[in-house]
Image (cartoon, grey):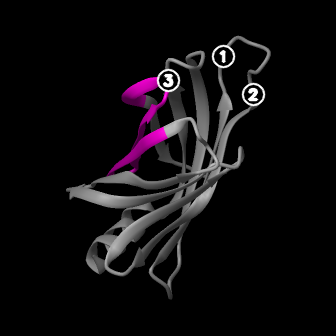
Amino acid sequence: MKDILLKMKSLFAGKWAGEGFAKFPTIDDTAYTEQLEFIPDEYKDAIFFRQKTWYKNNTEKNGHTVFWDTGFIILKEDKILLHSVQVGGRMETYELMQTENETFTFNSAAILNDPRSIRSQRIFTVNGDHFHYELNMASHAADFQNHLLADLERAEF
């Protein structure tokens, strides 16, 4: 697993920016802009990340924060875990379940402070200076399906 985390450190490191789209039966569909940063720790088996998105639509919410998330990807007990804390109070732990080339699939292991959610999944694909992100989820109100899709490029911000 250490070799996979080292690969992630190399591929993910840096700042990324671009656009995405959010949809789910319980929300209004919306486009958004996104900034995402990964900072690998050179001494520990850890990667710090922070992610923020803003509405990009023709409503009064245009430019307002949609989502704000921070956390770590860590190697612990021969598992790669993603720990996420979100601006709304939701906390999640994901475990890396599949790695294929430059695609990394994390499935939720625990979701706290959000009784609506049942399951979530994050999929990261890196291809050079392109970063593709998906978030799939299930809630008590909707079956497992795509919620977020974003395409980002290496950036300075």
- Going by the numbered disc 3, the residue's amino acid type is Ala
Q: Is residue 145 on the magenta stretch?
A: yes
**Quadrant showing the N terminus:** bottom left
Q: Disc 1 marks which residue?
A: 57
Circle 2 packing at 10 Å, graded few (<14), some (14-19), many (20+), is: some
**Tag 1 secondary structure:** loop
Q: Is residue 90 above or below residue 142?
A: below
- Going by the numbered disc 2, the residue's amino acid type is Gly
Question: Which residue in the rendered view is the most extreme toward the left?
Answer: 100
Q: Is residue 43 left or right of residue 90?
A: left
Q: Earlier in the sequence, mark 2 or mark 1?
A: 1
Q: Earlier in the sequence, mark 3 or mark 1?
A: 1
Evaluate if marks 3 and 2 touch, with contact meaning CB atoms under 8 Å apart.
no
Q: How far across and how far down the image is residue 119, in percent?
A: 42, 42
Q: Is residue 17 on the magenta stretch?
A: no
In-front residue for pair 145/2: 145
In-front residue for pair 14/79: 79
Q: How far across and how far down the image is residue 146, in percent?
A: 39, 29
Q: Disc 2 marks which residue?
A: 63
**Tag 3 secondary structure:** loop
Q: Earlier in the sequence, mark 3 or mark 2?
A: 2
Measure the C-alpha gap from mark 2 to mark 1. 8 Å
Q: Residue at x 70, y 11 (%)?
A: 58
Residue range highlighted in magenta? 118-146
Question: Which residue in the rendered view is the most extreme toward the right?
Answer: 60
Q: Disc 3 marks which residue?
A: 141
In the image, which is nearer the foreground, mark 3 or mark 1? 3
